[in-house]
Image (cartoon, rainbow, N blue to C red):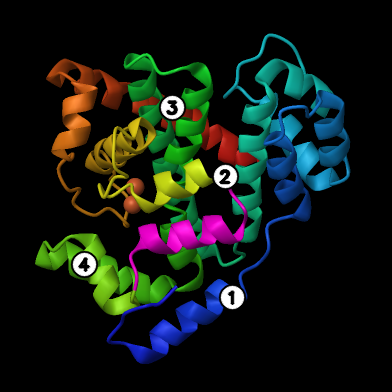
Amino acid sequence: MALRSENFLLRRYIEKAMVDLPAIPGIVIQVIQAADRDEVTTAEIEALISKDAAIATKILKVVNSAYFGLPRQVSTVGQAVVILGLHQVRNLAMSLGVLSALSSTNPRIMEYQKGFWSQSFASAACAQEVARMRGLPKKDQDAIFVGGLLHDIGRLFLITLFNLPYQQVIREAATTDLPLRLVEERVLGASHAELGAALAERWNFPEELVVMIRNHDGDFTQGQPYSEYCVHIADVLAAEIDDSELAVKPLPVSSDAAAWARLSDDDVERIKANIQIDVEKARELLGIL
Ligand SMILES: [Fe+2]
Ligand SMILES: [Fe+2]
């Protein structure tokens, strides 16, 4: 990716970090590829995931958490696949992969990351709710949930690896009232949406997810890109209730997305209230990972 920046050194560091990026576990990539094949079986996915004990254990912890609220304990990855479905388990594996690739042991950065993930869960719940309200199929709703969850991985990358310069970018956007994207492009050479899409591509994430990440600021693909609309709306609504240090003033929802979603003021208030509940549940989830 060609980065445009006034700050040559910072640009070089970011480019280098994109190349040297910690890999996500190989199993996650294999699960993504296997889940794409029509004839894949539950046994195959279970065998793959079981090869990586850390990922398998975390998947079971998440599945058995209050977040999913299943009526009985799930003790094998195979059961998890049967209950949640192949795509949900793949989505879970991708999210755990991101969590492990962009982790940190620095307590300050970990604090920022916690805020990041709460915000991401809020976006995920909101994106899925919009998809549900517009009657999109369940499979699309699941994909849109992950789009909401991972749409800002470019920010996570910056928070984790370029914390101080990125704090300055956020402060500048907040004090000048300029859109975050413009400040990012000028200082870092790329927006967090572009960086996130580049990361997702490097990690072989499904193309539909890469597109949701790249276009979440409102530069949509031609036609009626419903999933991009859902993630964009979620990004804006979640930002409106963001009270973390990393909060930036959200841009308005694009007119195309708004026209498609047809959300009333009541809908928006209800979604925001639900988001708060989901964020509470997600906090518990983050505690166990
Ligand atoms: Fe964003
Ligand atoms: Fe966002």
The residue that mark 3 highlights is: 278
Question: Alpha-carbon neighbours of circle 3 within 10 Å: few (<14), some, or many (≥20)?
Answer: some
Between residues 4 and 84, which one lies in front from this camera angle?
4
Q: Earlier in the sequence, mark 1 or mark 3?
A: 1
The residue that mark 1 highlights is: 19
Mark 3 beta carbon near ligand 2 (under 8 Å) = no
Q: Earlier in the sequence, mark 1 or mark 2?
A: 1
Decide whether residue 32 is among the magenta residues: no
Magenta residues span 190-206
Residue 268 screen position, x and y as percent = 21, 23
Label 2: which secondary element: loop
| 4 left or right, relative to 263 | right
Between residues 7 and 33, which one lies in front from this camera angle?
33
Position of the C terminus by quadrant: top right
Disc 3 marks which amino acid? Asp
Label 1 – label 2 distance at C-alpha: 20 Å
Q: Earlier in the sequence, mark 4 or mark 1?
A: 1
The numbered dot on residue 206 is 2
Label 3: which secondary element: helix
The numbered dot on residue 182 is 4
Question: Which residue is located at x 43 percent, y 71 percent?
Answer: 163
Disc 4 marks which amino acid? Leu
Label 1 – label 3 distance at C-alpha: 35 Å
